[in-house]
């Protein structure tokens, strides 16, 4: 796995800002030229044709919201600077209102074969309340357009815990599960203090953690009945349609990352680019990682291998852990035996994994493991 790399590109532009947004994004489309000039300079600076590129992911922001000439030039730059000849998946995030025929045609001619739509809910009242520009009908039209361009690998994101009723959320899951989408992601709403939604809700999340866990469990059941298998805590796919890019990330694959707020992992160094777009634009490319990079040592790598692997339904291979790190999983993580005795970890053949009914609290389990690693 180490000989191949993935690429993440952050495109921060959006046509409007959603009221819950905590991403590095902006609505000033006049900045596109400057941003893409900088992006191309960065891609050129880190160009490397010796590592075959496994997957490419355009995230944001809203990649479908930018000018087609920038998208064409971006793919041209990536092809010039990296070896994309054997790339197995290229994903572009889209919003329904900006996934026009022209944008979809551009994605298609540049090899994009997976679209990820930010749908969030099928309830138009909810969509309006959180500042989305699309309604459910717009999403259906965008899906139709995508299918007319032969996109048959399509993800829809939904959010758990939006200001709507429990049954509104379940209705969204049921509705989307019946559509010809091949992948669904369910993310829990995170209420950021600086967001307009936080102020609107007076800082009070619409649902308690327990209520959200119940909604999640119900959604998992519905998706399973519609042949969406969970392969990671937030991700569900029809057979053979798991997102290769994300799987690669969870399996500790290495990846280049370009653009504001992008995080990468090259050789044994993790790095973050400046979060704000203005800082990204004003920092010389050779200094983009200054003060924001960390070399991962042997123990940290073992930790990460498990922290990422346990988020997957398949869990972590115990024999691979020993082979890679020269120590047994149960010895390396001093609290692991206790967690297994309490039913928070189970062993399935060669793998240790989180039991199905504990998936929603995976973060607490991981933090318990992490705090007690190799003490
Ligand atoms: S589309 Fe995504 S990145 Fe853009 S404003 Fe909405 S939540 Fe933020």
Image: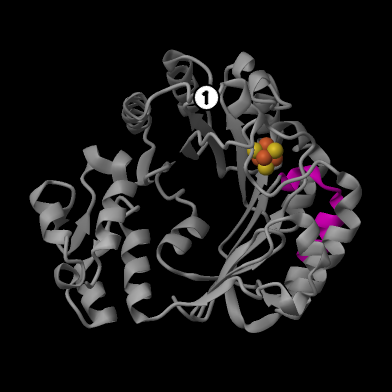
Decide: is 196 above or below 230: above
Q: Nearer the viewer, residue 159 or 185?
A: 159
Is residue 261 something that shows in the picture?
yes
Residue at x-position 23% and y-position 54%: 353
Q: x, y (%) of residue 324?
A: 29, 80
Q: x, y (%) of residue 211?
A: 35, 23
Q: Nearer the viewer, residue 199 or 54?
A: 199
Decide: is 70 above or below 215: below
Find ligand 1 in the image and state its quadrant.
top right
Farthest left residue in view: 341
Residue at x-position 65% and y-position 71%: 84
Range covered by the magenta-colored residues: 62-75
Residue at x-position 62% and y-position 42%: 22
Give the residue number, with chain letter if any, for mark 1: 162
Q: x, y (%) of residue 82?
A: 69, 76
The N terminus appears in which quarter of the rendering? bottom left
Q: Nearer the viewer, residue 87 or 2?
A: 2
The mark tally for this picture is 1
């Amino acid at each position: 796995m180490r000989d191949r790399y993935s690429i993440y590109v952050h495109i921060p532009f959006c046509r409007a800002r959603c009221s819950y947004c905590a991403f590095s994004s902006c609505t000033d489309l006049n900045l596109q030229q400057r941003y893409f000039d900088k992006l191309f300079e960065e891609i050129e600076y880190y160009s490397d044709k010796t590592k075959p590129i496994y997957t490419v992911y355009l995230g944001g922001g809203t990649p479908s919201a930018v000018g087609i000439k920038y998208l064409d030039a971006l793919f041209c730059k990536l092809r010039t600077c990296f070896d994309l000849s054997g790339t197995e998946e290229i994903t572009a995030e889209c919003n329904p209102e900006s996934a026009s025929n022209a944008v979809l045609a551009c994605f298609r001619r540049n090899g994009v074969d997976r679209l990820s739509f930010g749908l969030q809910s099928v309830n138009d009242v909810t969509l309006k309340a959180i500042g989305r520009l699309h309604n459910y009908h717009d999403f259906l039209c965008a899906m139709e357009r995508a299918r007319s361009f032969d996109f048959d690998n399509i993800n829809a994101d939904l959010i758990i815990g939006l200001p709507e009723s429990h049954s509104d959320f379940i209705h969204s899951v049921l509705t989307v599960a019946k559509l010809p989408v091949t992948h669904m992601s369910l993310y829990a709403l995170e209420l950021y203090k600086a967001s307009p939604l936080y102020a609107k809700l007076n800082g009070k999340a619409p649902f308690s953690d327990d209520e959200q866990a119940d909604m999640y469990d119900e959604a998992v059941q519905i998706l399973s009945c519609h042949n969406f298998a969970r392969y990671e805590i937030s991700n569900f796919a029809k057979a053979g349609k798991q997102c290769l890019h994300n799987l690669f990330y969870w399996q500790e694959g290495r990846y280049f990352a370009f653009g504001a707020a992008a995080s990468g992992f090259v050789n044994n160094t993790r790095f973050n680019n400046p979060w704000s777009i203005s800082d990204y634009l004003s920092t010389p490319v050779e200094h983009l990682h200054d003060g924001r990079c960390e070399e991962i040592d042997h123990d940290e790598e073992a930790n990460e291998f498990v922290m990422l692997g346990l988020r997957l339904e398949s869990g972590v291979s115990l024999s691979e852990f020993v082979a890679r790190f020269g120590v047994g999983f149960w010895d390396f993580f001093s609290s692991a035996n206790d967690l297994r005795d309490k039913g928070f970890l189970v062993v399935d053949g060669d793998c240790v994994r989180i039991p199905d009914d504990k998936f929603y609290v995976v973060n607490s389990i991981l933090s318990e493991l992490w705090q007690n690693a190799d003490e």
